[in-house]
Amino acid sequence: HPGACGSKSSSSSISRAAARAITIMSQFRAVLPLAGRTFAQQALKVPPMMAASRSRFIGAPTGACVNTLWYRSKMTFAKTHEWLRAESDGHAVLGISDFAQGALGEVVYCDLPSEGATLKAKETICTLESVKAVGEVYAPADCEVVEVNGALNDEPSLVNSSPLEDGWIVKVKVTGEAADMMDEAAYAEHIKEEGSGES
């Protein structure tokens, strides 16, 4: 029965064509979501909305790198490795340098002063206990403690991981002259001289 045989062959061809069309459409649907993405979004393999929100922070003035540079430009450093940063409210924030935290090692406890405490220049304002030593933090000038970094009670290692920002120690009201403070370039030279035994 040639007719029957021809009908079977035709049906088989149609089935194969339909299956192929379904496969192509499936592939097309899989690729279609990429059509609305930029090359950067595809390379990052993140959804368009996520990439859009991320792009707001790339190169923005409020980025972490820019913030760090801004903080450092406002800092002065003591020979004993404390830094002081003046704030717009007339107070100043105190912490220790990256060099100091590296020399001290992992900080496990911060003995913070009481708010309202008054100190003379070069008096110990705080002690930091690490796994290998105990370090003293000195007041760079006569001052009054107006705020302490309470986060250090739960996470003292912030002094290590973010010594110039989140690991700040106290906020003070400076009541005397902060003498012998250096900018970052001069402090870097001081570290070199200290390391070579020249100072």
Image (cartoon, grey):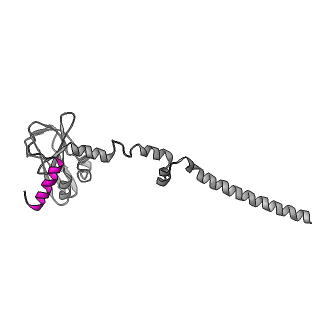
In the image, residue 185 lies in the stretch drawn in magenta: yes
Give the total of numbered labels: 0
Q: Can residue 127 be seen by looking at this rendering?
A: no
Q: Quadrant of the N terminus?
A: bottom right
- How far across and how far down the image is residue 109, in percent? 20, 52
Determine the residue positioned at 20% across, 45% down: 169
- Residue located 17% across and 52% down the image: 128
Residue 164 screen position, x and y as percent: 23, 48
Among all residues in the image, which is located at the extreme top? 89
**Magenta portion: prevailing SS class:** helix
| Image-quadrant location for residue 192 | bottom left
Across and down, in percent, residue 50 comes to 47, 46
In the image, taking residue 1 as reference, residue 132 lies left or right, namely left
The location of residue 198, given as percent across then percent down, is 7, 59
Residue placed most toward the observer, 37 or 168: 37
Q: Depth check: 48 or 104 in front?
A: 48
Residue 51 magenta: no
- Which portion, as a residue range, is magenta? 183-197
Residue drawn at point x = 15 percent, y = 51 percent: 187
The residue under the point 13% across, 47% down is: 182
Q: State left or right for residue 83 relative to residue 10.
A: left
Q: Is residue 23 visible?
A: yes
Q: Which of the image's four quarters has the C terminus? A: bottom left
